Amino acid sequence: MRVFSTLISSSSSIGYHLKKSYSHFHKARLSSLIRLSPSMATSEDSLRRALAEKLSAVEAQGNAVRALKAAKAVKAEIDAAIESLNSLKLEKTSIEKQLQATVTGNGPDSSFNREAFRQAAVNTLERRLFYIPSFKIYRGVAGLYDYGPPGCAVKSNVLAFWRQHFVLEENMLEVDCPCVTPEIVLKASGHVDKFTDLMVKDEKTGTCYRADHLIKDFCNEKLQKDLTLTSEKAAELKHVMAVLDDLSTEELGAKIKEYGITAPDTKNPLSDPYPFNLMFQTSIGPSGVNTGYMRPETAQGIFVNFKDLYYYNGNKLPFAAAQIGQAFRNEISPRQGLLRVREFTLAEIEHFVDPEDKSHPKFSEVADLEFLMFPREEQMSGQSAKKLQLGEAVSKGTVNNQTLGYFIGRVYLFLTSLGIDENRLRFRQHLANEMAHYAADCWDAEIECSYGWIECVGIADRSAYDLLAHSEKSSVPLVAHEKFAEPKEVEKLIIAPVKKELGLAFKGNQKMVVEALEAMNEKEAMEMKATLETKGEAEFYVCTLQKNVSIKKSMVAISKEKRKEHQRVFTPSVIEPSFGIGRIIYCLFEHSFYMRPSKAGDEQLNVFRFPPIVAPIKCTVFPLVQNQQYEEVAKVISKSLTAAGISHKIDITGTSIGKRYARTDELGVPFAITVDSTSSVTIRERDSKDQIRVNVEEAATVMKSVSDGQRSWEDVWSNFPHHSSASTED
């Protein structure tokens, strides 16, 4: 799995008290304000132009007023000029408010904003111990977090559903590999040489920052706060943010100097950018000779086990292997809570498939799904994501193949089943500058939260790159076989680079040139052969060097040979869905969080609307009042729930039932059983606050059916007597 792309954050002024729940704005506000549509982009440009014109008009009219006063014009004329000036100023202010609302995603009169919502949600999450900074009593370490009891339960439920949705559904082979990885493995995969971010240092304090983050923050702040920017300058800043991944070390350094960017905390000058490898290095064994790293991803453990997994699967393709585990990245300047951390949980799938047949037998099950997709063509032309039918996207070639499309569909179903808002979930195709040279296609599942659009799942067709890399480094062929019913006479393309000649010509770049030559398809190879035979030399583009090189006839032999073969030996392609579990969970927290007024209307109550499948506790059991008989009934129900495998909490304190409901709503508990008699109880649903009445003996059975998703609350509501909540809700 490649490095997650840089997160784009947007901020606004903090207003702590939210007058309305953020959830009420989910579709109406965030869908229209945060996504940048073509009309919105056009609106921003036109507003910037209008503001520039209005500023000029205000300045001209101000000069006119001053001139009239200097000339001692009649009062009526001066008053008329001042009235005209005030009118222009009002128009200017109106345009400024519209522009501010457009660039920040906050309406000029809105009492809510993303930063205030985030603060309210995070305060609740930390107070209720969903997660907290690690080593808190020692002031913590940036980028490390502990999950508390409800956070652990949510994470456990998400992973259990992931296993059910993917591993069981697809009969995947699950493995569990060590976190410590020998250097040679990560050398073969390219992580030792290329797993880097560019860093700059405060020249006086030595504090480190990510160079691209500083530039992105500068551009975002200018766009959001400097309303006098011309539309041309705004377009330039947006372009810089779009191509940050393409900029070289020197170009990033030049931008930092051009924009006058300094250290955020001290305003001291910054060093030139330099690469920093994100892996935690260690040594294996007491001698310190055997270098190892804490793995930056779980995928390599699956790739190096391909041969044994292929044998275990009866030497049959396709098949998928899966792994859940910890990964480690020594982030330069971690921020944004659970979204960018130094230790995190990944759930990764490597689906091995014949490169000549990437169809999927179950694609029809997801082909009719329609959801937000953001193909690269729409991104390049400044359009927004739009709803597309998955089957149509695959048939048109927007999505490269059926297997990739199948997993995109399954990821959509997984995320929406967890409780992610489908209107704030999109699948964005990687642009050409984001794609690894070996990848056939790649899409990110991005979830919109208060930080903007966050990449949470990467779904990539990585071709055969990983298996080929480990085959070459280990000298163990990681290949699959297709046996023919009858021997076939086949014409084989033979590309034989002359490594001695290439070494003399390209020295340290020899390996990359050899790999590029060997990766040529038949058409490219035969065209090169013809050019070499006629001219003795050919221009050849090496993508890993990002330039053309000159290949002479003595450097490579290209031919075709006819052979009889009994089987086809090939290196499988890999389709890889990779899930950042912490990011998904954080976005789920935000999508589930809302506030609603208490019955008295004197305070706002926090609620997490977790679906039962991920809720940390499925139900609570409350005796209505402190009564020995009610408490005995509560204990009987608790034993029944435990036997049914339903996580629950029993509360026999004397606190009012309304306050107990509010406490558990804040934990996201979907159901509450209230014992108010010895024969029957009420069951209350969290979001609607509706209540039904059931016999004590039926309570655990009903809870089991709604908690497991066998029945919906609507179904239960229609089949049991209703109970008024007026007397119990505070």
Image: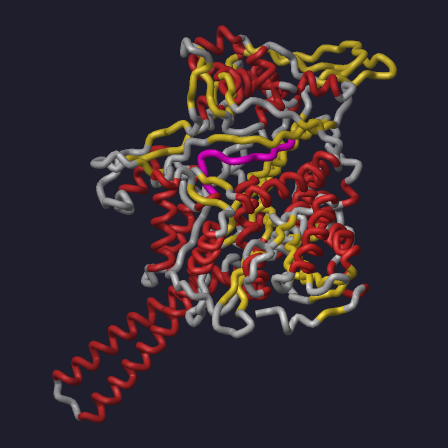
Check residue 679 for magenta coloring.
Answer: no
Q: Is residue 365 visible?
A: yes
Q: Nearer the viewer, residue 182 or 575?
A: 182
Q: Position of residue 468 (x, y in %)?
A: 61, 19
Pick the quarter of the image with the N terminus.
top right
Figure disc tally: 0
Q: Nearer the viewer, residue 311 or 121?
A: 121
Q: Position of residue 657 (x, y in %)?
A: 59, 64
Instruction: List the single residue furthest toward the front.
Output: 628
In the displayed structure image, the side of residue 141 where residue 581 appears, left or right: right
In the displayed structure image, the side of residue 426 where residue 121 appears, left or right: left
Q: Main secondary structure of the magenta part?
A: strand
In the displayed structure image, the side of residue 665 where residue 43 appears, left or right: left
Check residue 342 for magenta coloring.
Answer: yes
Instruction: List the single residue furthest toward the top.
Output: 500
Query: Which residue is painted at 78% across and 45% down in the image?
Result: 365
Pick the quarter of the image with the C terminus.
bottom right
As drawn, 423 above or below 523: below
Q: Nearer the viewer, residue 290 or 689?
A: 689
Q: Position of residue 23 (x, y in %)?
A: 55, 62
The picture quadrant where one finds residue 404 is top right
- Which residues are drawn in magenta? 339-349
Query: Which residue is painted at 20% across and 36% down in the image?
Result: 204
Query: Which residue is painted at 37% across and 61% down in the image?
Result: 13
As drawn, 336 above or below 510: below
Q: Position of residue 458 (x, y in %)?
A: 58, 39
